Amino acid sequence: MDLGNTSARGTIAVPRHPRAATALRSIIAEIGQRSGEFPVFLANHLPMVLEAMGRLGAAPERLAEYAEHYNRVHAVPALPPPVAPLTADTWRTALGDRSRETDLRDFFAEEVSQRGGVETIRLYLPTLFPGVAASATHGLMRLAYALLRRDETEIGISLGYWAAAYLAFPTRLGGASPTTDPLVPVLAMRGEPSFSGIVLPSTLLWKFIEHMGTLPAFQAQLGRLVPTPALLDELRQLSLTLYAATRSFEALHAVTGCHWLRLVAPTLDRPEILVAHWWEVVMSLYAKIGMPELPNAATIAAWRALPVPPDADIAAAAIASDDEHDHSLVFSAFEEFKLTGDPLYKVVAAHRIGLIA
């Protein structure tokens, strides 16, 4: 399917506040003393979206105000008490156990102090690849922003968070044939009755992802996608198209996830393996948004041609919002626009914060 991919790089005209970086260091350090989730099992976006707001031009006063608002409204708790120390031989026993978040953080903090953040990621993250659905992929988000900030402390925190919330699909036991086309397993899902009308007792996104992994028809699609070096570039365009077509909360995470993967990829020997696992998470959420048809190239071209406000107006509207997904989407869209030059990123950013219809 021709989705009209672009390749020219773009520029964004949004200056940073001169005091934002200094302010962020102390605010994010304080946030690091709190848990990676707040009740009940929702991702604590605060350290990431504050960085996004700062890079979109937020003043230190707005950053402090938003941090206070977020912690108060969401009652972000302190870390759970430690249970028992973990070692390189035992840390895997705590995977997926949120009660071990402190132990896992402590383990990875020590590894980072001994090896450095990048080497610790290269050594340990492949074990965490299958569990990238952790906290609905927000473990990946926190690691990506830690790397963006070059923050060694946050690298240890994010690895511990990912490990504590680890969520993997079952190992594929057979099913449909392998493919290098990421659209093939997606389109194979359409019309499958077991993917329709799913009602769960929880509204948590990661609970829906977890449920999809129990369905035999979905299990048949797992492991089909062959990881290739070009995979992330292909998924970037597919994710943007899916979000532009649906404007859904689920597809928003596909757009931002491509940005996060791009930030993490340089630390890995085979980043395409992580990318393939991540795409299976997006596939599970495709069922949640009703498995819509993707728009054709002409429709996408028309969307790209829509007029948008100036970059500074989009950034200012995002900064003024109290919705963490506004900050996240606009910042990632701007960063991906810098990479690709695709004007559709600015269109979806402006729409997200209500500046265009």
Image (cartoon, rainbow, N blue to C red):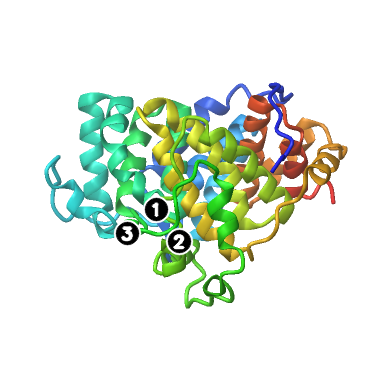
Q: Which one is earlier in the sequence, the residue at label 2 or at label 3? A: 3
Q: Few, some or many C-alpha atoms within 10 Å of disc 2 (few <14, some 14-19, many ≥20)? A: many
Give the distance between the C-alpha atoms of the residues marked 1 and 2, in whole angstroms.
7 Å
Q: Few, some or many C-alpha atoms within 10 Å of disc 1 (few <14, some 14-19, many ≥20)? A: many
Q: Which one is earlier in the sequence, the residue at label 1 or at label 2? A: 1
- Identify the disc placed on residue 206: 2
Three-letter residue code for mark 2? Trp
Q: Few, some or many C-alpha atoms within 10 Å of disc 3 (few <14, some 14-19, many ≥20)? A: few
Give the distance between the C-alpha atoms of the residues marked 2 and 3, in whole angstroms.
23 Å
SS of the residue under disc 3: loop
Residue 33 seen by the camera: no
Image point (64%, 39%), residue name: 237
Do the residues bearing badges 1 and 2 touch, measured as CB atoms within 8 Å?
yes
Residue named by callout 1: 134
Tell me the mark number nearer the camera, choosing from 2 and 3: 3
Q: Which one is earlier in the sequence, the residue at label 1 or at label 3? A: 1
Image point (50%, 41%), residue name: 180
Residue 238 seen by the camera: yes
Three-letter residue code for mark 1? Ala
Residue named by callout 3: 173
- On screen, residue 124 versus residue 35, left or right, reads left
SS of the residue under disc 1: helix
Three-letter residue code for mark 3? Leu
- On screen, residue 138 versus residue 121, left or right, reads right
Q: Where does residue 47 sit, x and y in percent of width and height?
A: 48, 41
Image point (74%, 35%), residue name: 4
